[in-house]
Amino acid sequence: MAQSENNKAYYHQKLNRIVEYIHNHLDEKIDIKTLAEISHFSPFHFHRITRALLGEPIGAYITRARIETAAKMIRYTSLPIEEVSYQVGYETPSSLTKAFKQHFNTTPSEYRKNKTFNFKMTNSMETKSLNIKKAKFITLEDKNCIYLTLKGAYDKMDYPSAWATLWQKVKEQKLFTAGIEHFGQPFDDPNVTEESNIRYDACLIIHKEAKASGKVGTKTLKGGKFAVFLYEGSYTNFRYVYDYIFNTWLLESDYELRDEPVREKYLNNAEKTEEEKLRTEIYIPIK
């Protein structure tokens, strides 16, 4: 068996533990932290890996599992809809009705009356043509940086202001040298995390000793082995870039992820470059 097939099996075996737990605990509150512990996936990559394997965010899968299980119980048993709602984890029948109608465009009671009703499901994953180069593999040393944390939706963050603040610190603390690099650390998957909780660090790699000041902190970006993808195009397509990396490349590769967040290196100035010509290196930590 090819190593990449072994890798797919490895990830799917971990996924199976999650899926089995979900379907055995539909009548309870399912905690994402518990699922991450069961799977032994790195917490930095849990949401992206499960989304890649399931074809949808883990929260959406749990909701769908509850609603589809409810549909089967409504069709093939005579249990009252109220009892069905409790057995699939809804506190009230009205909560099930609302979710059921949003998902299937019909109510549980209407569905019970119409036994010929057929559900047509579509895959929620989107695809997009992207200009991504074949991965290269490098080993990095630790890199010191000054950084500023931003919170909110990725497309609404004030990146120009963040970079300007960091460069102001370079000027104030006389940190300028050749080789300063712009890195970003997107910690959260916007398909899963609420906008208000999404966290991103804008980082300037520096080569002199810096001091934390105000909202600007200092830290070390840990080195190690990385698969690096060169992407050319708009930042608005990053979600599709990560979908490709985690949905296709990872499962077809021989590599396992390390317990480190991904990072992005920006190779040109977004203020002075056309969107389609922006060049970004995506760093995926691997063992």
Image: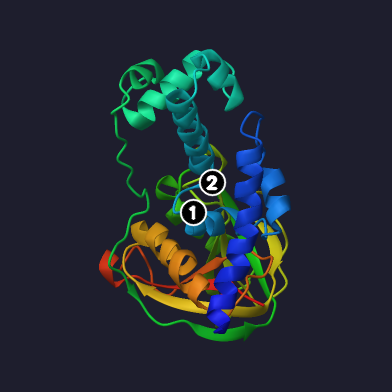
The percent position of residue 162, horizontal first and vertical second, equals 51, 54
Query: Disc 2 designates what residue?
Result: 58
Residue beneath the point at 53% across and 14% down: 82
Circle 2 Cα neighbour tier, 10 Å, few/some/many (<14 / 14–19 / ≥20) = many
Give how far across and how far down residue 69 sits, in percent.
50, 33
Q: In this rendering, is residue 50 above or below 135?
A: above
Image quarter of residue 267: bottom left
**Structural crowding at the residue carrying mark 1, measured as other residues with C-alpha within 10 Å and reported as few (<14), some (14–19) or many (≥20):** some
Question: Which quarter of the rendering shows the C terminus?
Answer: bottom right
Instruction: Report the Cα–Cα distance between label 2 and label 1.
Output: 8 Å
Give the residue number, with chain letter if any, for mark 1. Answer: 54
Q: Residue 160 location in percent, x, y? A: 43, 56
* Disc 1, SS: helix
Considering depth in this image, is 137 or 172 the residue closer to the camera?
A: 137
Q: Nearer the viewer, residue 8 or 244?
A: 8
Residue depicted at x 51% and y 45%: 192
Residue 138 figure quarter: bottom right
